[in-house]
Each structure stands twice: as C-alpha cells, then as structure tokens.
Amino acid sequence: MLKNYPLYEVDEITSLKDMLENSVKKFGDKTAFLKKDDKKGPYQSVTFNEFYKDVEGLGTAFLRMEMSGKKIAVIGPNRYEWAVTYLSVVNGESMIVPIDKELPYEDWSNLLKIAEVSCVVYSSKYSEDMIRAREENPNLRYLVNMDLEDNTDLEISFKKLLASGKMMVNEGDLSFKNVKINPEEAQIILFTSGTTAMSKGVLLSHKNIATSLMSMSSMTYIGPDDVFLSILPLHHTYECTCGFLCPLYRGSTIAYCDGLKYILKNIEESKTTLMLCVPAVLDAMYKRIWSAAKKNKIDGTLRKGLKISKALMKAKIDIRKKIFKKIHDTFGGHFRMFVVGAAAVNPEVAQGLYDFGFLVIQGYGITECSPIVTLNRDVNFRHDSAGQAVPVNEVKIVDKNADGIGEIVCRGSNVMIGYYKNQEETDKVIVDGWFHTGDLGYMDDEGFCHITGRKKSVIVTSNGKNIFPEELEIFLNENEYILESMVYGEENEQDGETYLCALIVPKYDEIKKTFGEDVSDDKVKELIEEAVKSVNKRNPLYKYIRKYEIRENELIKTTTGKIKRYLEIPKK
C-alpha cells in the first residue's frame, strides 16, 4: 500500500551528531525549545544555535573530566537540561544511560551499578539520595546537579560545568567538535519498562536511532511549523526518539509541559500542534469534550454538528475546524495531531477525535527497535490498527494460529545491538536476524498490523482457545464508572479449567458526582457488576469474566502507563 502514497522527503543522516549539525545549519535561529523557569512564568525560547552551543560546551566539559568510554546517566523530569545532557553525551565519547525518574531509590541506584555509571546528571529532588548512592557505588565519581548555582564539596553545578565547557570552546578547544562517531557502536543503554518481567539494558547505536528518525518522518509529515508538547517521560525511547530527537531532526519546536493537569494550558501557551500521548490521555481528552458539552447542555447540538460534518466529508468538504471551533479553541487553536503509542487505542475514541478535526495516528514499537516497528500514515490510516511497517523494517507474523494470529517479528537497521552484558537473553529474541517482539497480532491484506496482546500475557483455555486480556480491558474501560482494569487467567483446581478474573479500579470521582459523596460500597459493587455483565454479553462464553476484585488504588504501572502484570497478578 505504501507505493500508492509517496513517502515524504527527508534528509539523509548517519548519526545523531550528523542530525544535530544538519538541523543547526538549516534552522539555526529558529526556536528549538520552549522552556520555563517556573510554572507561572512565560515560555522562553532557545534557538537551534543556542542549543548546539550548550551541547558542545557540556560535551567538551565531559571530555575534560575524562569521561571518554564511560557511562553517564541522566535522571529527572522532562526539561531542557535533560536534552542538553543526552546529546552532549551521545555525541561525545561516552554512553548515555537515561533512568526512569519514578523508580524507587533501590531500583535506580541498582541500575547505576548494573550499567557501571561513572557520572550522573540529575534534578535537585535526587540530591540527597545521589550522595548516598555514590557512597554505595565505587564506580560513581561525579554528581552533577541541574539546579545548583555553585559547586559544593559533594556536587557539581550543571550551570558551572556548562559555563566552563563553553569557555573551553571559546578558547579553541575542538575536542568535542572533532569526535568521530561510529554509527554502528553502542552508545545508548535503555532499560526496558519490564511489564511482564524485570527490565533489561537495551544497547542502541546512532545508526539504530538515525534510521528510525528517517523512516518515521518519511511516513508522517513533521515540519518546522510544528510545536511538540512533551508530556511523556523522556527516559522512555518512545518520547526520546519521537518527541525529542524527531522534532530536532525536522526543525520543529519542543515545549515542556508543566505537568499533566496543565496540558491544555501549556497547549494554548505554546501554540502546540502535535503531542505524543498514551491511550489514557487520549481517552481523558475525548471524555472531557463530551463532559463539557453535557454540562453546558449542548451535547445534542454537538451530535447534530457531527452529522452535518460527516455528510459533508463524504462530499470531500471539510468544515470540521469551523463547525467545532470552540473545541479547537480549547486546544489552543493550532492543534492538529495526536500520535499514540505504548498500548492499544480505543478505535471509537480515535474516530471521535478525528470527527472533531484532530488527526489521531497510532503506531507500534518496542524499546529494542528504537522504537518504531509499524506506523499509521497521515494520508493512510486505520484507527483499529497499529499501521504498516516503517520503510527501514521488514515485519512478519510467525507461528500463526487458526485465526492468523502469531508473534510479530521484524528485522532492520533499527533493531538493537543486544542486551547489555546478557548474551543469553539476546540470543533468545534475535534468531537468524529476526527480532522476536513477544507481541501477538496479525496483518491484514493491505499490510496493516493489528496488535492483539503480549505473548506472555495471553490466556490459553483447556480446549486451546487464546484469550487476549487487553481486548477485554478495552471493553471494561469504556464504562464511565471504571478507571482501569486488568484481566488475567486463574486455573480452577477442581476441573482444571482456566477462568477469567479481573482487577477493577472504579472511577470514584465520577461515581460520587452522579450518586453523591456518601455513595455506598454496595452501590459501587452494583455498578461494577453491571459493567462486567455488559462486557460478558458482547463476548462468547469462554471469554466471560467469572470473578473480579474491586481495587481502591490504581494498578502498578510503568511511566508510560503499561500495567505491570507480573506484579499485579494475585499470588496463590
């Protein structure tokens, strides 16, 4: 199908250093970043030229600190200093190790040991724990605090280090500029989120990322007029590659979000056109539109507008931005596209937002593939699929069952080098050049990939039926009184049959809004019972949820919203 839709032209790059230098030449005085000193203040512009000077300065300072061949970690919220650190390390002679800022101390300090990190750049929130971590870790030599004004006996000020590096450059130090990048060499260690097992260190090269950038940008248009609002954690390869490196590659602007509750405010302030998100954010946006319409008693008018708009769209007349102007104004008036990943999107939500005039494109990726494997195009998309293989990738389905569902495997220059110091696990997933994703799905006649679930989470009944819990979770989560759910299988000791169970977190705010603050536990249980029965009615008998447990607290998740099933499945 790709041959019927010409690919967008993209610049050829061989490395991230090549990418940055090329972008500086093309977009030098254009705004690369919008950042804030505090949430109440305005966005401040940083140009591509200014950003490059900061990267060069910090990179030079790291070389003077004898960090060549060493690992440098970065941990903290999405912010400008994070971006400077990443590219100054990866474009120098060190390896970058992004760390999940939401991990507890024991976990992230252990990752620093596993990766043999010599230097960490972090926000002040971690200051006390970092000092403790260095005492416990003989490899850890330097602590660089993003928020310190001056150096202390224990910590280095990011600002001071950057200033000293820039001074070295001004005095003629060309060491960073002259670094020769080997595109095939591992210079990034990314720890997987570990939704079904403990995380592993994924080794990526410049070539992996560069080919991913070219590939995805050729399928969906991103340009200098776009402004990305960065809301997902930068340590994750989805946001890092697609929401940080891709905008820089294409000359777009990156605005940092003040926090999830400030998304709409930041969209308006920055004139955002594009945002990467997970399905939960998309669902919340869509529900908010209809909730506001009902509150203002205009939901009937909105439905009439949709009927008119859809009729005109069939005649190739698009007045969505005009007829739904108030909705577009809520999104700042410039917003055009959501890019969704990390989990399956509810097709009804994607279609609903599209009907209002917002493009929603879904992709599928995995850390080991830098990360994009398949992607919907802005000119050719299906809301119920994860798109078609990106040009750099070959994708196929192996070990298919009777329904054509099997494991998704791929090969291409975006596939990782391997797992850090773990050849045994590497050999399990890369077989004869093909990377085995562990995800299940099928390809339709036009090459669109449909994800059905994780191989490790699929539930197999005694008569050989395969049940994908993610499918049932989408049905449950459609209910207005359910916040989230997780479906799993439990074997009955008496008959040996596997029955479906569910952990369900009610949407208490919505329930209290409808039934009052003093709503009883029995009423909550009644509402959840009705929701489960409703889902069962739309499914065959073997997919019936036989037992459920109501949870008050949210399920344990990764920072991209994936439920950590291996931690949540009740132990017998």
Image: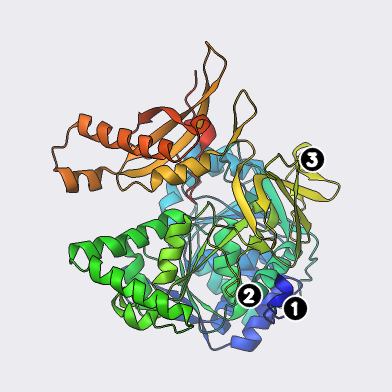
Above or below residue 243? Residue 166 is below
Residue 396 placement, left or right of 121: right
For residue 56, the mark is 2
| Residue 115 percent coordinates (x, y) | 66, 45
Above or below residue 263? Residue 42 is below
- Return the residue nearer the eye: 415 or 148: 415
The residue that label 3 is drawn on is: 423
Above or below residue 9? Residue 209 is above
Classify 10 Å Cα crowding around label 2: few (below 14), some (14-19), many (20 and above).
many
**Residue in the picture at 34% in, 83% down:** 322
Residue at the far right in the pictured view: 432
For residue 12, the mark is 1
Q: Is residue 51 visible?
A: yes
Mark 2 falls on what kind of element?
Answer: helix
Q: Residue type at mark 2: give it.
A: Glu
Tell me how the rendering is colored. rainbow
Q: Earlier in the sequence, mark 1 or mark 2?
A: 1
- Disc 1 to disc 3: CB gap under 8 Å: no
| Front: mark 3 or 2 | 3
Mark 3 falls on what kind of element?
Answer: helix
Residue 497 placement, left or right of 476: right
- Disc 1 to disc 2: CB gap under 8 Å: no
| Front: mark 1 or 3 | 1
Q: Residue type at mark 3: give it.
A: Gln
| Residue 332 percent coordinates (x, y) | 35, 77
> In which quadrant of the rendered image does the N terminus lie?
bottom right
**Residue in the picture at 80% in, 41% down:** 427
| Residue 195 percent coordinates (x, y) | 56, 40
Q: Earlier in the sequence, mark 3 or mark 2?
A: 2
- Return the residue nearer the eye: 557 or 70: 557
